[in-house]
Each structure stands twice: as structure tokens, then as C-alpha cells.
Image (cartoon, rainbow, N blue to C red):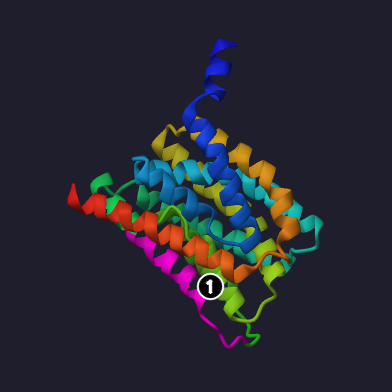
Amino acid sequence: MVEITRYFSDTTFIACLGIGFAAQMVGSSLGMAYSITCSSILLTMGIPPAMTSATVHTSEVVNRLFSGLSHFRYGNVDTAIFRKLAFFGSLGAVLGAVLVTKIPVTMMRPLAAFVLLIMGIRVLFMGLGRFEIHRRNTQLAPLGFIGGFVDVIGGGGWGPVVTSTLLIRGNMHHIVVGSINFAKFFVALAESAALIIMLKTVQWNIIAGLIGGGMLAAPLAAFSCRKIPRRAAMIMVGTLVCGLSTRTLFKALTQ
């Protein structure tokens, strides 16, 4: 009983409750930035890149399930998009997990920060820019594979790659967000299983905090998906991720 009380009073656990809630609100309403928001913060806390990726994606297994079910309830899921992205995204994620555990931490930290910085810039530009959007067909198989691969390598990136591509190609916002969130449950399951098998251990107090906060936010985020001002939220998320990634990249290169 004492150990359980100590666990839930842990400052890292409490901080991750807030991180998980905020990241789920953003990720489940915009279809992007859950992973890159969490990963950027955890990297600044000194968590190694491979461990950060394993921790974030393990928490996503539960959070994306709640998010996906919430979106499904509100009619935000296209099953055709969902199935292809889930399958090919999982394949890309497993390949990325193998690679991320083989690269030394000293090389992986600046690489992960750089990938996150690029993703943050893309999200920011999407929020600031004005696109001529026309409905076009999208090859979902390669898109899902690339999204899953980049997601593991950068500790995030599924949303900026997949969501932004589908939105730019004219798909409805709430359908894209709902479908990719539900698909990400299966991608996150593949990512976390592969990373845990290869790393043998993860930070369970951080995972528990991220899951707890994410579970609280999931229904609210799915409900607000059609109402949230997307441009303003994307600008804020892009700015946050760019700032955190730049700080991590600078620290990694100057140590």
C-alpha cells in the first residue's frame, strides 16, 4: 500500500498526467502532435530517444484506443482509410523500431530532435499557410508505411505526415482525424511491442501518467473535433514543438 501511494505521488507521474491530458486534447482533436508533443518534452527531461519512443508509443496504445472509440462513436471514422493505414503503418513502425534501437544514443538524440523540428515546422506552416485544397485520391499504403516509420524514428510524426497529407488532398477534417486516430492504435501497438521486446524495460511511471491524462481527455477531444479552431491550435503546437526540439538539438550538439 505504501509503495502504491508513493508511486501515485511521484512528481514525474503527476507531471505526465498533465502532459498526457494536453497532448491527447491536441492529438485527438487535430489528428497530430500527441507523440511529438510528449517526445519533445521527455527528451528535454533527459530520457534517451529509444526509451522516449517506447514510453510514448506504449502510452499511445491505450490513449489511441480510447480516442479511436470516441471518434467512432461520433461517426468520425472511415473504415477504408482506417484499415489500410493501420496495416501498412504497423509494418513501417516495426522497421523503424528495429532501426531506432540499433543506433547509439549520442547519434540518435540529435537525429530525433532534428526530425521532430522538421515535423514541428510543417505543422506550424500548415497553421500559418493557406492551401488550395482539391479532392484527390491518395495512395494510403505508402503513406501509412512512411508515417509509421517516421513516427518511431522521431518519437512522433504520424500525424504531421499522414494527417497533413490527407487534409491537403481534400479529405474532410473530422473523418481524417477520426480514422488516423483509430488506425494509430494498431500502429502504436506494433511500435511499443517491438521496442519493449528490444529494450526490455520502459518507464512505467511516465506511461501511467500519460495514459491517465489521455483517458480523461479522449471523449472531450473527440467531441470538440468539429469545433476547435484548427489553425490557431496548429500554430501553437508547431511553435511548442519547434521550440522544444531546437533546445534539445542545441543541447545534444554542444555536449
Residue drawn at (74%, 67%) of the image: 78
Kindly tell me whether residue 141 is visible in this rendering. Answer: no
Kindly tell me whether residue 234 is visible in this rendering. Answer: yes
Q: Is residue 123 left or right of residue 62?
A: left
Residue holding disc 1: 127
Q: Measured from the top left, where is residue 172 in percent x and y?
A: 70, 75
Give the class, few, some or many, for how many residues have Cα within 10 Å of label 1's Cα (few <14, many ≥20).
some
Residue drawn at (73%, 51%) of the image: 220
Q: Is residue 246 left or right of residue 200?
A: left
Viewer-closest of 212 and 90: 212
Residue drawn at (44%, 54%) of the image: 152
Viewer-closest of 98 and 156: 156
Residue type for callout 1: Gly
Q: Is residue 254 left or right of residue 29?
A: left
Q: Measured from the top left, where is residue 248 in percent x and y?
A: 31, 51
Instruction: Name the image quarter holding the N terminus.
Output: top right
The prevailing secondary structure element of the residues shown in magenta is helix
Q: Is 119 within the magenta?
A: yes
Q: Quadrant of residue 44?
A: top left
Region rendered in magenta: 114-133
Q: Is residue 131 above or below residue 98?
A: below
Q: Measured from the top left, where is residue 164 in percent x and y?
A: 55, 72
Q: Measured from the top left, where is residue 231 in percent x and y?
A: 58, 71
